[in-house]
Image (cartoon, rainbow, N blue to C red):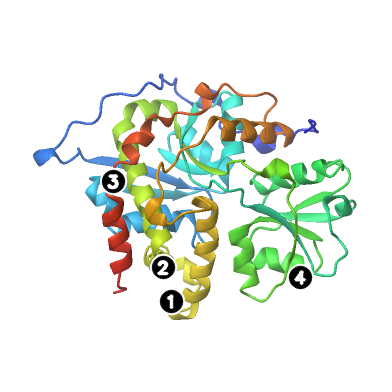
Amino acid sequence: MKQFLRMGAAALAVATLSALTACGGDEGTAASPAADGGKPAQGKITFAIASAVIGPKEEVATYAVAKDQGFYEEQNLEVETINTDGSVAAIQAVASGSADITAADAGSILAAVEKGVPVKAVGGLVQNWPWVMAVKPGSGIKSGADLKGKKIGVISLASGSAPYARAYVHEAGLDPEKDVELLPVGVGAQAAGAFNSGEVDALALYTQAYTTIELSGTGFEYLPNPDMFQGIRSITFAVRKDTLDQKRDELTRYLRAGYQGMLFASVNPEAATRIGYKVFPQILAGKSAEERVANDTKVLGAWMKTATPKSGEPETFADWGAISEQEWDKTAAYTIGAGQITKKPVMADVWEPGLLAGANTFDSAAVVAKAKAYAPK
């Protein structure tokens, strides 16, 4: 894939290094000493949510379920959240010390590292490429080449949908700076309005966002993704390097609770959706749970398909968070092509998988049983 014009530095700028304290190494520290009875020491983690929670996806599966079902309590963790406006802003929050961990776009993490921002990826989340291009049925647009002269709606110019749209049209032989126009349209009703009104000719969103819009009555025709997008990673957990040193044990426990939440949501997405309403009541948007639960369960199910293996049953899932060297290579190549970074990164500067062995030490059978036995209160 040829290099094309990079996104403006301002759009990709993460926190300036002068505002940051010096970071330490990433070899980790000894686990927190056990409290009474072998219970892990009390820990506190702040999680930066990368976007407004208007529907059930990673915030519900990893945070809400872990909070409601006692997975954080089992890990003796107090977990708080802050809201940010996209992956770049979420990484800024982690880099500045406002948060300990975030789930952000892998390309944004790679871009931050190249700029010298002291953050590292510590665990995967979305493992199947979620982005896809959609047009109106009967529009006559059948391929990327047909998008020449068209307007493409993206969530924002700082979101993962913008580099995806640029890479998509570039792969089709177009100049993403001259041949198409990217317009920020958000997600949900805002994106649907821009699409249905003709303000944009196409949308570049993730599959879960399309499911939400389709359930409101809008129809789409999806353009095929080129092979270049296969094997690219998307949403990934990231932390600041010195936080990794200082809170290695707490971060391991946080990931453990989050992956337990993922397993629970895989087994019983309706239960996870109802839990999401309790923790994030804004998802309901003034409606009752019974009015929304059927559609929202489908929405969460669509997201779970991007975040879990394509085959096998949830009970058999293992190695939560793992990202292979090949997947990182493909992700880096895509990120270079998308203009987010200029060269292949040194993986040791980007990726610290050392927390995952500990994060995967939980009783999967007990989580599965809990999910199957869930009864709304």
Question: Percent position (x, y) of residue 119?
Answer: 49, 29
Residue at image location 83% in from the left, 54% down from the top: 143
Q: In this view, does 47 lie to the left or right of 185?
A: left
Question: Percent position (x, y) of residue 363?
Answer: 27, 49
Q: Is residue 235 left or right of residue 224?
A: left
Quickly name the residue at label 2. 277
Q: Can residue 52 be seen in this view?
A: no
Q: What element carries label 4?
A: helix
Of pointers 3 and 2, the one earlier in the residue sequence? 2
Asked if the residue under mark 3 is in contact with the one under mark 1, i.e. CB atoms within 8 Å, the reply is no
Q: What element carries label 1?
A: helix
Q: Quadrant of residue 111?
A: top right
Quickly name the residue at label 3. 362
Which tag is nearer the camera, tag 3 or tag 2? 3
Q: What type is the residue that disc 4 sits on?
A: Asn
Q: Distance between the residues labelled 1 and 4?
A: 27 Å
Q: What type is the residue that disc 2 sits on?
A: Tyr
Asked if the residue under mark 1 is in contact with the one under mark 2, i.e. CB atoms within 8 Å, the reply is yes
Question: Percent position (x, y) of residue 324?
Answer: 52, 33
Of pointers 1 and 3, the one earlier in the residue sequence? 1
Is 341 located above or below residue 376 in the figure?
A: above
Is 93 located above or below residue 198 in the figure?
A: above
Q: What type is the residue that disc 3 sits on?
A: Phe
